[in-house]
Image (tube, helix red, strand yellow):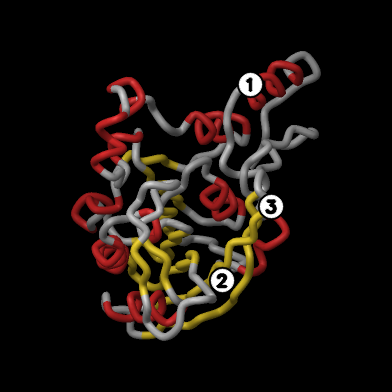
Amino acid sequence: MQHGTSAATQKDWTARVAAIEWYHTMDLGDGIRTQGVFDHSSIMAKYPIPERLDGLRVLDVATFDGYFAFEMERRGAKEVVALDVPCARSLDLPRSRRNRMSEEELDRPFGQGFSLAHERLQSKVQRVDMNVYDLSPERLGKFDVVHLGSLLLHLQNPIKALENLYDVTKDRAVIADCYSPKLPLRIMRYLGGQENCAWWSMSLGCLTQMIRDVGFSKVELKTKYAVVHRKSNRRIAHAGFLAHV
């Protein structure tokens, strides 16, 4: 990937980046860096994504600003599809919270960060507006590698999402999600979705078993690590799995 800029437009790029509230911290080249809530650059080695993806078709689920999608393109993937919902209306919001939101708030489009980064990096990644509940091989085909990051806790039905993930995986899936070190065995704690649209807190055993139960023949826990929330400095426990069809 390249990045398109010149001395004449550097100030414009900086202003455009500053106008967006970023989820991912990304280096867009020539000193332009997004101030995302999460910076994955120092922990990328913890994600069991192959170093090279040459010739492979790859799917990034819940792409948001596209950090992982662009990274997989950089690693040589032949085709990268980046999946996410188009607006807040498509989120698993509690009904009480949804009822408090205006139509404008519900329909405000997501993806401004992705679009800017896509332009800046001169990327060929294809973004698809689609809910993970609608993901199927009939709609998008199958992928050699599928990546899912930090999504399951935000879903009312994480099992359905994992089933759909399995259905579009040709070879392997990289699943990196939150877990609670305080919960034992295969325990899932209900949170209700009111704060940050988080519905569940899952034990490591629960998360592992859920991935197994949807059909993956081999599920390997590769890494355990913490993702730091920049604004609160909170460390969020994550587990990285490699799941084979």
Q: Say which residue appears at 40% left-offset and 59% top-offset.
A: 153
Who is closer to the viewer here, 226 or 61? Answer: 226
Of the pair 222 and 169, the residue shown nearer to us: 222
Q: Amino acid at mark 3?
A: Asn
Mark toward the start of the polypeptide (2 vs 3) = 2
The residue tagged with tag 1: helix, strand or loop? helix
Placement of the C terminus among the 4 image quadrants: bottom left
Question: Gap in Å between the C-alphas at discs 1 and 3?
Answer: 26 Å
Task: Name the residue at 30% across, 43% down.
Answer: 93
What amino acid is found at the position of numbered circle 1 in the picture? Arg
Tell me the crowding category of disc 2: few under 14, some 14 to 19, or many 20 or more residues within 10 angstroms, Cα based. Answer: some
Q: Position of residue 169 (x, y in %)?
A: 33, 67
Q: Is residue 6 left or right of residue 97?
A: right
In the depicted structure, whether residue 170 falls above or below residue 217 = above
Residue wearing tag 2? 48
Closer to the eye: label 1 or 3? 3
115 w.r.t. 104: above or below:
below
Q: Name the spot of residue 122 as percent of width and height, x first.
A: 58, 34
Which residue is tagged 1? 16
> Dot 2: what SS?
loop
**Residue placed at 80% from the left, 34% from the top?**
31
Pick the quarter of the image with the N terminus. top right
> Where's residue 20, x and y in %?
58, 27
> Dot 3 corresponds to which residue?
233
Residue at 59 percent across and 75 percent down: it is 224
Q: Disc 1 vs disc 3: Cβ atoms closer than 8 Å?
A: no
Marks 2/3: CA–CA distance: 24 Å
Disc 1 or 3, which lies upstream in sequence? 1
Counting residues from the start of the chain, the first of labels 1 and 2 encountered is 1
Work out whether 167 lies above or below 140: below
In the displayed orientation, state which residue is furthest to the top.
Answer: 8
